Image: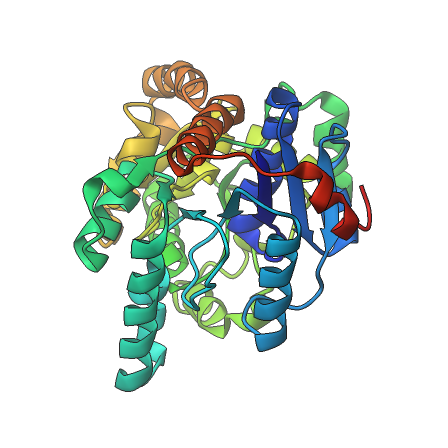
Amino acid sequence: MNIAIDLRRITEFGIGTYTRNIVRALGRLDQENSYYLIGAPERISEIGSLPANFHSVPLLEQDTTAKGYLECRRLVKGLNCDLVHIPHLFWLPRNLPCPYVMTVHDVLEHLYRARDRSGAKRLMHFHLTRRVLNGASRIFAVSSFTKIEIEKLFGVPNGQIQVIYNAIDERFLHGHASESDRQLIAERYQVNYPFLLYAGKISPQKNVVRIIEAFSALKTELAKAEQYPDLKLIIIGDELSKHPDLRRTVIRSGVQNDVRFLGFVPIDTLRIFYDAAKVFIFPSLYEGFGLPPLEAMAHGTPVLTSNTSSLPEVVGNAAVLVNPENVFEMRRALQRVLLDQNLRAKLKERGYEQVQKFSWEASALSVLDAYREISNRRGGKSKPQQATQLVLNS
């Protein structure tokens, strides 16, 4: 088979994590089929070393422009592709010369973000997205929750959607942080105290305002019992300047000296924060999958997360689940996870087991099986020699 994978959104947070890891796993598993990675060569090179059957095909135009649309179609036709994999939800029809599959991480843009558009734009966006979804030979949903959302919202037939789970980046599986690692965050970030941790994007559905409110209530309760007087809350994510409401919440809650916003932190440093945190808190209102709780579990850190969307499916019985809209329930659960040593030990062991249920190799095998099934259903073989003329960098 000749398989094209559109990597033009590889810089986006969740999509990039998925794309890099699924391509790496396919590279480890499949040296038979030809893969054409369409996008900016310097971004594709960030995936790392790939076998000789993976080729970089430069395309700098974005998928939302007319030129990007025409160029992508021309490349796919010239490469004589049997299949195109688009690793994200999109809404502009592609009219490709061969079947396409797509990965849907969530349908958030038709829920929270849709409120920012006028009624006419929302309607057009919705109908075009539904057309694109129904035109796919297969939709890979990253969780059963996301599969149900696609069925319910867009009326896509059940058999057209396949659940293929995400997994954590292998860099979170390198064992516990060393003493020198902990010294690094003490020196670079002046973190030498016990802390609760949130890591992820900062947007309304992530519920960070309620994290701060629950933390403030927790500090009050701990002060009454004279416990953890130096406990802090560390928030790793977007720059604070983009979210002034969070600073206002910190001031209103009276925890100015106990909440720290660190902005973006690279993975090699983030894993140290996961390892050192007393509790990882992730009370998101909506997740298509939700990787951060699993990343924290890989480091033996107890997790508190939401009882909504995909999160119960992802964390199983390895986390404490709360109603993310109830600040006092969140506070009580935080206090319990922080102080109950038996519960902490149980969550640690269950967390290790839960992480093992997800792997990029297993996901890539399922993707590869779907590629083969769709190609066989279509029938016929491509002619690889015609494709080589368009490959500029391999």
Q: Position of residue 304 (x, y in %)?
A: 35, 36
- The residue lying toward the viewer, choosing from 376 and 113, is 376
Q: Position of residue 318 (x, y in %)?
A: 33, 23
For the N terminus, the image quarter is top right
Q: Position of residue 241 (x, y in %)?
A: 59, 71
Q: Position of residue 165 (x, y in %)?
A: 40, 32
The number of numbered discs placed on residues in the rendered structure image is 0
**Compared to 296, does 133 lie above or below?**
below
- The residue lying toward the viewer, choosing from 5 and 197, is 5
Determine the residue positioned at 52% across, 31% down: 168
In this rendering, position of residue 157 left or right of residue 230? left
Instruction: Answer whether residue 177 is visible to the viewer in this image.
Output: yes
In this rendering, position of residue 207 left or right of residue 294? left
- The residue lying toward the viewer, choosing from 120 and 194, is 120
Q: Quadrant of residue 68?
A: bottom right
**Compared to 371, does 348 lie above or below?**
above
**Compared to 96, does 85 lie above or below?**
above
Q: Quadrant of residue 190?
A: top right
- The residue lying toward the viewer, choosing from 136 and 352, is 136
Determine the residue positioned at 77% across, 29% down: 52
In this rendering, position of residue 379 left or right of residue 70? left
Determine the residue positioned at 36% across, 70% down: 113
**Compared to 369, does 247 lie above or below?**
below
Residue farthest to the right?
393
Instruction: Answer whether residue 233 is visible to the viewer in this image.
Output: no
For the C terminus, the image quarter is top right
In this rendering, position of residue 103 left or right of residue 64? left
Identify the colour scheme used.
Answer: rainbow
